Amino acid sequence: MDDDRIRWDARWRERGEGPGEPSALITALAPQLPTRGRALDIAGGAGRHALWLARRGLDVTLVDISEVALTIARAAPGPDVTENLGAASGLDAARRGRLHTLALDLEEAPLPPGPWDVILCFHYLQRSLFAAFPEALAPGGLLVIVHPTRTNLERHPRPSARFLLDDGELPGLLRGGLDVVRYEEGWLSEGRHEARLLARRP
């Protein structure tokens, strides 16, 4: 919706920063994530995770409602623009990925067409998307979800309750065709009460 786009554009303008570093919750999954193939970063903002995935060799599509955020991602040293990121990450040139950006309101439009080898959804809750995930993933593809739960309100006033998972809700949102590889929920390393799920399409 236009109101959401305006609000998020304003937030990213106010920040006036680059993409930032990827979450330790995501980088801890590095041994389980592929370094080749296609990845989709849903509502990925300025691309801190999309850029990290592309450095590892994936061809990444970053989707967000905010064109301001996507402009920040495109301005960062990165994949196609990224010889230096490939060198810094220790990957040779043949394994560097690419970053594509797409301004999209996922409440109004479907997921970009797959198949995807990785779908990442970090701190974005749209329950209706879970029906689309199994078909969007390639066989063997991985779904990564990280999102705070209602218990997070015990220590943090934001996000508000309407943007939070119920405690224990996340595994039940998975539709048929995906196997849970790893699931945990609690006060995780970055100070929030979060659910983290890694699922695979057989």
Image (cartoon, rainbow, N blue to C red):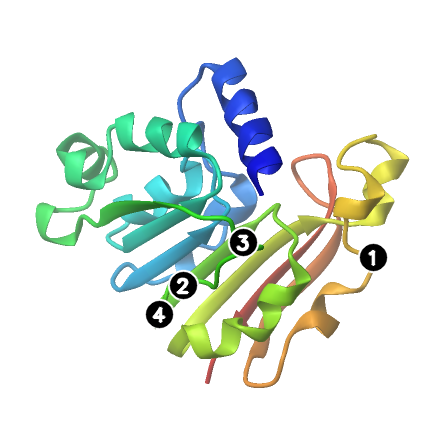
Which of 44 and 78 lies nearest the eye of the viewer? 44
Q: Nearer the viewer, mark 1 or mark 4?
A: 4
Helix, strand or loop under label 4? loop
Is disc 2 placed on a helix, strand or loop?
A: strand
State the separation of the CA atoms marked 1 and 3: 17 Å
Q: Residue at x 66, y 53 (%)?
A: 125
Q: In front here: 166 or 53? A: 166
Q: Is residue 127 above or below residue 80?
A: below
* Amino acid at circle 3: Cys
Q: Are marks 4 and 2 in contact (CB under 8 Å)?
A: no
Residue at label 2? 118
What is the spatial separation of the Cα atoms under label 4 and label 3, in whole angstroms? 15 Å
Cα–Cα gap, marks 3 and 2: 10 Å
For disc 3, the neighbor class at 10 Å (few under 14, some 14 to 19, many from 20) is: some
Residue receiving disc 4:
114
- Callout 1: few (<14), some (14-19), or many (20+) C-alpha neighbours within 10 Å? some
Q: Could you say where residue 150 lies in the image, as x and y percent from the top left? A: 84, 48
Please identify the quadrant where the N terminus is shown. top right
| Tag 3 residue | 121
- Residue 173, horizontal then vertical, whole percent: 70, 71
Q: Residue at x 47, y 35 (%)?
A: 66
Q: Is residue 8 above or below residue 140?
A: above
Residue most extreme to the left: 94
Secondary structure state at the residue bearing disc 3: strand
Task: Give the CA distance from mark 1 to mark 4.
Answer: 29 Å
**Residue type at numbered disc 4:** Gly
Sequence order check, earlier mark of 1 and 2: 2
Q: Which SS class for mark 1?
A: loop
Q: Which residue is mark 1?
A: 166
Query: What type is the residue that disc 2 sits on?
Result: Val
Q: CA distance from mark 1 to mark 2?
A: 25 Å
Give the Cα separation between the discs numbered 4 and 2: 10 Å
